[in-house]
Amino acid sequence: MSPTRCRRMTWRIVCAALALTCWGASTPARAQQDTIPSINYFSVFPVYQAGDFADAIKGFEASGRTAIKGANGRWIDSICHHAMTGEAYYHMGNNAKALDHHRSAILQYLQYPNWMHSVEWVPPRPSAERIVIPWGAPQRVMRVGQFTRRMQMTLGGLVPIPGGQGAFNNMRRVPVDVCEIVRCMGISIRRFRELSGPNTLHDPLMNSLITALSQRPVPPNSWGESLVDVLLGMAHRAIGKNGDAEGFLKRGLVAAGEFDHPLTPLGVQELVHIALQETNFSKAAGLI
């Protein structure tokens, strides 16, 4: 089979998978049957990772149309759809559309800045996986943790009955891939800084994000605090506050005081870039 025909077949498979759930996926109840983001979103990654970015854009946009929608518009799963569509456009060299999507991902987060408060954070466990770095001995001491990707999130609450006749409880729990949503947030912050360039310093978006993250929108003493620290560090670096950024990034590199977590690679990368900006090459080398 030729490469072109293989790509077309892969895309047809993705489209078929999306079509199976399009008929009812516009309602939150339907989208919650697998996970958040949905399986439709994850089914596009083989296409994206194969470098077929044009087809990946179609896939992420199609899965975005099945994302959760409520009374206030799109929900937090659309952070991922925007971020990965932006990444596909970025790799195709369409920086304007990439920037638009990464901006949209950050704005989507700002619509629901406290969503992580409702997550039931599962403590990390030591991972039995042995990490082998093929290009040399790492300078950092690494201890990779095992993190639960799908954590329960509590939505809803008491809703008053019209006429003062009491209230009913519509509280429910849904499985959310917290790691993926936060990973996409980190990617969008980094790309927004890269694509906006010096304009980032004058754009109020990053300051709005810093204000929201500074409220520490996670339960105290949960490992989610490490994720918030990394995002805060990235946002501070975006507006040129490298000193503040470095403090947050260092504090957020490990979860529960010992484990590397899903945002650790982005945090290390940001610290290395700060060291390189300072032309401190030995400091940069010590981080990797």
Image (cartoon, grey):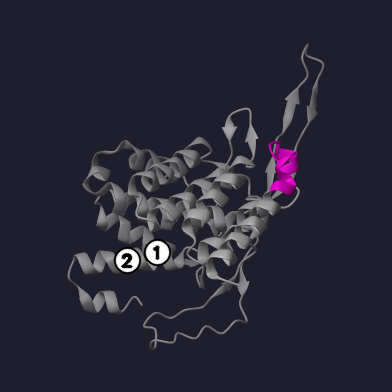
How far across and how far down the image is residue 83, in percent?
Answer: 47, 50
Quadrant of the snapshot with the C terminus: bottom left
Q: Do the residues bearing badges 2 and 1 touch, measured as CB atoms within 8 Å? A: yes
How far across and how far down the image is residue 203, in percent?
Answer: 29, 38
In the picture provided, is 17 more to the left or to the right than 130?
Answer: right
Q: Which residue is mark 1?
A: 267
Tell me the chief SS of the magenta region: helix
Amino acid carrying mark 1 in the image:
Gly
Q: Return the residue nearer the eye: 46 or 54.
A: 54
Residue plotted at (30% across, 69% down): 272
In the picture provided, is 130 more to the left or to the right than 21?
Answer: left
Span of residues in magenta: 19-31
Amino acid carrying mark 2 in the image:
Leu
Whether 158 is drawn above or below 33: the answer is above
Report if residue 148 is visible in the image.
Answer: yes
Residue plotted at (27% across, 44% down): 200
Q: Quadrant of residue 127?
A: bottom right
Q: Which residue is mark 2?
A: 271
Q: Residues within 10 Å of mark 2 (few under 14, many from 20)?
A: many
